Amino acid sequence: MRTVTVVGASLSGLYAARELRAQGFDGRLVVVGDEPHPPYDRPPLSKEFLTGRADEEDLALTDAEETAELDADWLLGVRARGLDARGRTVLLDDGRTVSTDGVVVATGASARRLKGGGLAGVHTLRTLDDARALRARLTRGPCRVVVVGGGFVGAETASSCAALGHAVTVVEAAAMPLVPHLGAELAAVCATLHGRAGVGLVTGASVAALRGTAAVTGVDLTDGRALPADVVIVGIGATPNTAWLAGSPLLLNDGVLCDDGCVTALAQVVAVGDVARVGGSRAEHWTSATQQPRAAVRNLLAGRTLESARSVPYFWSDQYGSRLQFAGRRRDGDTVRITEGGIAGGTPDVEGFLARYERDGRTTAVLAVDRPRPFMRARRELAAEEAGMTPVTVGGAGPGGR
């Protein structure tokens, strides 16, 4: 290959660029990014950056020295609008085209929005510009904050708002936040962190309407309640950025469909990070974004799938001074066993706990609250066990060969 184009100046896009050089690619490297900013770290946006404990320079993922070493053409502030039928030309929205021999799709995902969310005071938190706007509003003085969505981003943002002294209420449409990730039993335990920090939690209700004319003044819920609000933060998930690929040969279904090695229906196109549906699942986690590029790049340069990018899923979340860590593949019906620490009255002990999810005598996943060292041991055990299992066979160079 003489030219490889990375579409997406994201975390996964940067890691793909690094892997290309590390694995010996010495041709032209082009990185296209729809934001004007060089790659930055997103997890601190809802935590350290929002509370003022980190500034923009702390978010930078690369520096001038590495940028020079990568020797890439950075096309920032321009959006990809199409990929030709052979996957050899990337079309940009400013009219330019990039001829290429290989493509890494790393376009990430965009925050879902509420209907009527154009009012002043209604925010999402996905990008640096989102975080800038929200931080500016929160530093103007105490306000009433309603966080819509009790997932990880919602919980972290609520935690930061509470730490800044704002009155916070979290609204979760499900019966309990994080049930798909943690299961009902431990999701209920982790939900108590909100109340322990003085944050209100409303479950089983969604947003019926936002109140206000120019600026938001409140949130009407489907259960008839009305919550006053000066700031509404919407954290109801994200949609993979695949619209620009419509009409291309790539298969799209809640992301770009890939085999276990991140290879798409075109052998010269791979996908990584939040936009990639690898081996049947899509993971919006920092770990996936940093681990997938190694295998994806190897397979791209080889022209076929040689290495799997599947690994034990892992994510963490910092909420109200506690760190939640999860690894594995939990399924409904797994038995939960607390192996360290404890839960008193449905609330985590002050020193936290380690829980194992088990099925047929085997650990399928682990969850820790404020137990980092035991968690890392358990995570290594999971990885070792999975490595010893029979690997998934990958047929062909893309989803059509499975």
Image (tube, rainbow, N blue to C red):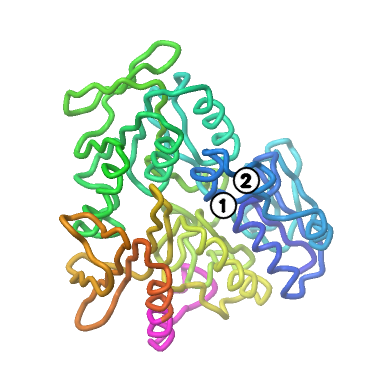
Relative height, residue 153 to residue 184 (above, below): above
Q: Quadrant of the N terminus?
A: bottom right
**Amino acid, disc 1:** Ser
Would residue 315 appear left or right of 346 to someone viewing this image? right
Element on which disc 1 rests = loop
Q: Residue at x 38, y 68 (%)?
A: 327
Q: Which mark is residue 82?
A: 2
Label 1: which residue? 248
At which x and y percent is residue 376?
43, 74
Q: Nearer the viewer, residue 318 or 295?
A: 318
Would residue 302 appear left or right of 280 to someone viewing this image? right
Choose top left, top right, bottom left or bottom right for residue 213: top left
**Amino acid, disc 2:** Gly
- Please state the extent of the stretch shown in magenta in the rendering: 381-402
Element on which disc 2 rests = strand
Would residue 206 appear left or right of 78 to someone viewing this image? left
Mark 1 neighbour class, 10 Å CA radius: few under 14, some 14 to 19, many 20 or more: some
At which x and y percent is residue 274?
50, 54
Q: CA distance from mark 2 to mark 1?
A: 8 Å
